[in-house]
Structures are given as C-alpha cells and as structure tokens.
Image (cartoon, coloured by chain):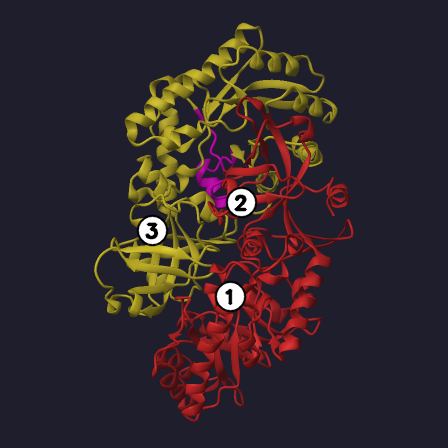
Chain colours: A yellow, B red
Amino acid sequence: MTSSIERALQVITTPCLLINVAVVQRNADAMRQRCKDLGLVLRPHMKTHKCLEIGAIATANTKRCIAVSTLAEAEFFADGGYDDIVYAALFTSDKLPRMTALANRLSSFHLLVDSVNAVDLLDHNPLVVGKRWSVLIKVDVGSSRAGILWDDDEDGVRLAQHITVSQCCTLRGVYAHEGQSYEAKGAEQIRELGDECAERILSVANKIRLAGFECKTVGLGATPSASFPSPLMKDLTELHPGNFLLYDVMQTMIASCQPEDVAVRVASRVIGHYPHRNQLLIDAGWTAMSLDGKGALPNGSFCLFEDEPNLRLMKMTQEVGYVEPRKGKLNYDNYPVGKILLLLPYHSCATACMHRRYIAHDNGAIVGLWTPCSGW
Amino acid sequence: MTSSIERALQVITTPCLLINVAVVQRNADAMRQRCKDLGLVLRPHMKTHKCLEIGAIATANTKRCIAVSTLAEAEFFADGGYDDIVYAALFTSDKLPRMTALANRLSSFHLLVDSVNAVDLLDHNPLVVGKRWSVLIKVDVGSSRAGILWDDDEDGVRLAQHITVSQCCTLRGVYAHEGQSYEAKGAEQIRELGDECAERILSVANKIRLAGFECKTVGLGATPSASFPSPLMKDLTELHPGNFLLYDVMQTMIASCQPEDVAVRVASRVIGHYPHRNQLLIDAGWTAMSLDGKGALPNGSFCLFEDEPNLRLMKMTQEVGYVEPRKGKLNYDNYPVGKILLLLPYHSCATACMHRRYIAHDNGAIVGLWTPCSGW
C-alpha cells in the first residue's frame, strides 16, 4: 500500500487521516460472516468512524440496524437514510426533544435504560399515536460502567416490569458492552471472557423471561469478543461491535486482529532534522492523533510507523510529533524533510474523532473525501 | 457564575464547551497592559481557541498582529478580515500553494524557517511582483523542539545571510517558543526561565546584527513567561502567547494564573448512580475533554470540578466520565441524574480543539455560539 498511496498524497496537506477502503470492506465482510455463522444479527456501532460511507460498507448497503453513541450521530445517520438505530448511551431529560423527533421519524429507534426514573421520563413524553418507546435494559456484565448489575436478582425483573406496565414504552430486551474483553490477550482469553459475559447477560434475560416478560433482544458488543466469538455467544441475538471496521494497534496487541487488518493511518510529513538530539519532527501532534495509549506501547511510542519498525513517536505537542529511533542513530538521508510517514494509531476511535474529513483510498488512489459527524 | 449559567444551560445538550467572555476580556486586557508596560508588541496566538470572536477580544478589535499554528487557521482568520499573521510552524513544499495565496492576499504574512533548504523552497516560489516572503528564523532557546540552536555560533548568521541574499525573501527577525517555562512553578521560577530564554534569543539577534544583517523582530511566546514577564524581556520586540486567553488547570499549577482566570469549562450532566462502587457517571468522555494531563493532577483526576472540590474524574471512555469522591461516600442526593457539573480542563488548547462550537456566556446568559476553525 505504502508507496502508491504516498504518491497520491503528494498534493494533500498533512496531517490527515487515511482510510483503506479494501481493508474496511474485508473487516466488514469477515464480521458479517462470523455473525451469520453464529445465527446472530450484526448491528455495527458507528462511533469509531461516524461516517455514512463506512456505515454503508458495515451494513452491506442496507443502511439498517446500527448503534450510535451520540444524538448527533443518530441524526446524522437518520438524515443519511439509515434506520433501526440503537442510541447506545444513557439519556437525561434535556435530550428528550431530539430523541422524540428521532423516534417519531424512524421506523425503529431504540434506547437504553438502567433505572426506573429513565423509564418514567419516557412515560411522561409520549410519542405520536401508534408509536411507543423501544427500550433495552442496559446491563453491566462486569465492565463497571453503566447498567444494572448482572448478578442482582431483582433489578432486571423490576425494570422489565416497570417498562411493561408503562404507558409509552415497550421492552425490547437487554444490552451490554463487555468492556473487560479489552483486557484479554489472545484468542483463548478473548473467548473465555466472551463466554463469561454471554452467560451473564443470558442469565439476566432468562430471569426476565421466567418472570413472564418478553425479552427478544440479547445483545453484546465489543470488538475483541466479536472478532473471536465464544461458543455461548450463539445464544445471544445480536452483536454490536464498532472498532472492527478500522481496528488499531490496541486491537493487534489484544490479538483481535492482525496488523494488516488495521485500515487507518495518520499521514504526516517530516518537518525538520535535529541530529544533536537524534530526533526528527513531524507535522502530527495531539490534534491529529489521540494521546490515548500513552505508556501502552513497547518502547514508549504513541503509535507504530508503517514500514519503519525502528521509529517511535516519543512525544506530541499541539501540531508537532517527536520521532526517535528505537536503536542507533537516525540516518536522515532516509527521512528527507517533506517525506511522508504513515502512523498506525493506538486507538482508532480516539484518533478518528479528531479529524473533520477522511481520505479514502483504494489500490493506491484516493477515491473519496469522507466527512464524519462530530459534536453531540 | 455557576448557578446562573446552569439555568441558561437547561436546554443545551451536554457535553459542551463554555467560554466566560468577561474572563477572556480580563485576561486579554491584562496581557495587553503587561506588554504595553514593557514596550512590547502583543501578537496573540490563536491556536488555543481558533475562533474569530476570541481573536477580536485578543486584538482589541484591530484584527491585526496574530500568530497561528496551521494553514487552516491562517485562512480562517484571513477570511475573517485579520491581517499581519505569523504562521508559526515549519512548512514543507506541499504547503507552498496555500502559503503563496496567503502571502499574496495579506499585507503581511510571516513564516518560520530553521534551515537553508526552507529558504530555498521559498526562493523557488516567488510571490506576485512587489511582494517578498517575510521570514523569521526559528530559534530553539532550550525547549528542544524546532529551531536552530541558540548557542550555535554559526547557524543564525549563516541562515540570516542565506535569507538576505535570496531572491524572494526578506529577513524579519528571530522567533522562539520558550516551552521550558511550562516546567516552572511560581512567579519566581517563571521569571528566572524568562530571563534565561530572553537572554538566549537576544544573543542570537545580536550575533545576526553584528554580522551586518537586519533583525527587527525578536519574539518569544509562552503563556507562563508572558504572564510573569522577566526584566530582560523588555529588550525583546514582541510576545506571542496563546493559552492566556482561556488559561486552564495546568496554568494554575504553574501559577501563571489564578483559578478565577480560567475562562473555559466543559459542561456535563450526571447520567447514572452506581453506589456499589461509590461512583457516578457523566456524559463527558475523551471526545469532550482531552486525555492530556493524565497523572498530572493530585488525586489522579483528569480535571477539577467547579464548586465541587471533593469530586474527581478518574477515567474517561468515549462518551462517559467516571466520577468519584476524593474522600468518603458520594451523597447521591446532591448529584441527581441530569444535574450539570462544570469541569475545568487540565489543558484548554487540547480540550477546545475537540469542540465544533463554543457556548459563550456573560453574566449568566448565553451570548453567542462561536465556531472555531478545525483541521489543517
């Protein structure tokens, strides 16, 4: 990929974010096949890339069945013709007017709740005649973020009952993000954690069903466990991973993917040589690549460099990156001022959200300038 | 400020970035007075806020004499009627077409160079008849980023000569960012470092002048030293700090400013209570507030909370912040779901650049929605 896309980038201002379309397509196809094999619905999360073009690849052009992390994303994808959207965040009353507009205009718009108060908020805000709020109970299966506790014997049933008897809500099912799968290393650990999380959310669904309530959807979502699904996950109904479309260095360290599956680069240029400190500077700082991952990579680097295993990014200021060799002295002849270096970010979600456009490329040619949604 | 702006925010989606206009005005007035007292030109850097409205306050509505960190900023401010702009970054050849357009359309557009090759690049790209590239020599006064070394006896003079004999360039002076002032604590240390850096850049200017070349501009720029200028700084010609308009928690820790000088907040709402782990969640994650500052604040918090000294932000994911008490048990009655919490960011430059609009407020009322420039 490198040399050919470097040629196409000659007239492009750096820093910029590159998306390899063929790799995104391959990642999407693989995930779709994996879900098909398990008999699960794939509901790709849009939070990593937030753009219509990658959404189209992720949904095989159906533009149906996605998850989003903000109302801005929900509106952006709805405006782009998407439908069947899970707004996968807890809401507060200030967000009700925009949620109401989305629920009224879309065929299906689903919400997460983890408290009876949230259900009451919905109940005091009825939709147009014939529409009801579609509600998923958010479950904490061990990642200690939002959600009712999976091992609480009463919370799930109480909430299911509260939703079922409400005036304006319909219980759709249970939903969880198994964040702890990010602490796994390798397929075996990923699958072990996947089974544990699947067992936990299935136990909540079963308690709700045993109490006499419907619980159609049982969903888990995290890229590591969706990349290496565990046996028990076939008993779920859907998966909603997001990062898998782009992957990143973090996912290669977890072993959710191989380095060649990482579809995103930050392109940057050498802007100066500083031999007295064995460094060069590049035009990518923390406005172009997230500080997430500080301390996580070997050798203290913030990222990997494509085709340059000896380089490491030691520091970033607003618009400048400080590059050093891992070993030996830099041979500056190999890095003339103006040379393009391609950086593989530690965390693609955190890096992509810092860019207002993506440069999509395929087969060495730029094939699109894609505009992601931003803000809230 | 708190209670009144909280009322005005009731209908505003969180997270969002708030700018206290009166505080910005006071910070700008104080810096202008400081420069006037020293007989120095103030060239406020726009990189922290990147918006026309704060630029107007910073330049006392003259819209003249600013510094920027990207070509996108230069074009944005030029489009907004600004002139006399220092593009305070090293450039590469891909950026020449846009630099040429800016130099041709503006009365004054100044560039930084730290190599003869950069001068040659300019010389191969002449401007329209009657225009010359206005060039500042970038000097490293000890911050180890870009620039010729201040204590190299030959580099400055060689570069000055190269610029002076070139076809298309005019030497304007020398410029440095004294980044090491961020390592100071307290006015005394800030002034000591300020004197050291002023002495260093003045020595470069003197060598250039002694060799027979003109060196009108001698500029330093960093918020700590500009907030507590040292005696020797009166011999410079200009200062180009940027952060001082907003300040932040980092600057309070350096003691460049007092807590009441911090003009920026991230507004966020409580979205859930998790008493089993003594936490609450808020709707601000690392898309709304930079991860910069991780580990820098006491108690491991990513930020301070206005009027809530016992709260700390322990962790952020994409759209969620994890809040704990420093001591004791959280009294959830004080933090109902939906309550607005105001976060003081560790680093305002890194946080402001993550927002596509700012909510400007004054005297408890929202007075504007300001749109910063973004991208490159």
Image quarter of residue B58: bottom right
Q: CA distance from mark 2 to mark 3?
A: 22 Å
Q: Where residue B34 sits in the image (x, y, percent)?
A: 65, 72
Q: Amino acid at mark 3?
A: Ser
Q: Chain of mark 1?
A: B
Residue B262's place in the image compared with B127, above or below, is above
Residue drawn at x 55%, y 39% is B313
Image quarter of residue A270: bottom left
Please name whichever residue, A319 or A328, is drawn nearer the observer in this view of the structure. A328
- Asked if residue A67 lies in the magenta stretch, the reply is no
Q: Amino acid at mark 2?
A: Thr
Please name whichever residue, B26 or B326, is drawn nearer the observer in this view of the structure. B326
Q: Is residue B210 left or right of residue B129?
A: left
Q: CA distance from mark 1 to mark 2?
A: 21 Å
Classed neighbour count for the residue bearing mark 3: other residues with Cα under 10 Å, few (<14), some (14–19), many (≥20): many
Q: Mark 1 highlights which residue?
A: B70
Q: Is residue A350 left or right of residue B229?
A: left
- Tell me if residue B354 can be seen: yes
Tell me, yes or no, whether the two marked residues, 1 and 2, touch with CB atoms within 8 Å: no
Residue drawn at x 65%, y 19% is A116
| Residue under disc 2 on the same chain as residue under disc 3 | no
Q: Is residue B248 left or right of residue B178?
A: right
Q: Which residues are magenta?
A: A41-64
Label annotation for residue A301: 3
Of the two numbered discs 1 and 2 on the same chain, state the one appearing first in sequence.
1
Q: Chain of mark 3?
A: A
Q: Mark 2 highlights which residue?
A: B287
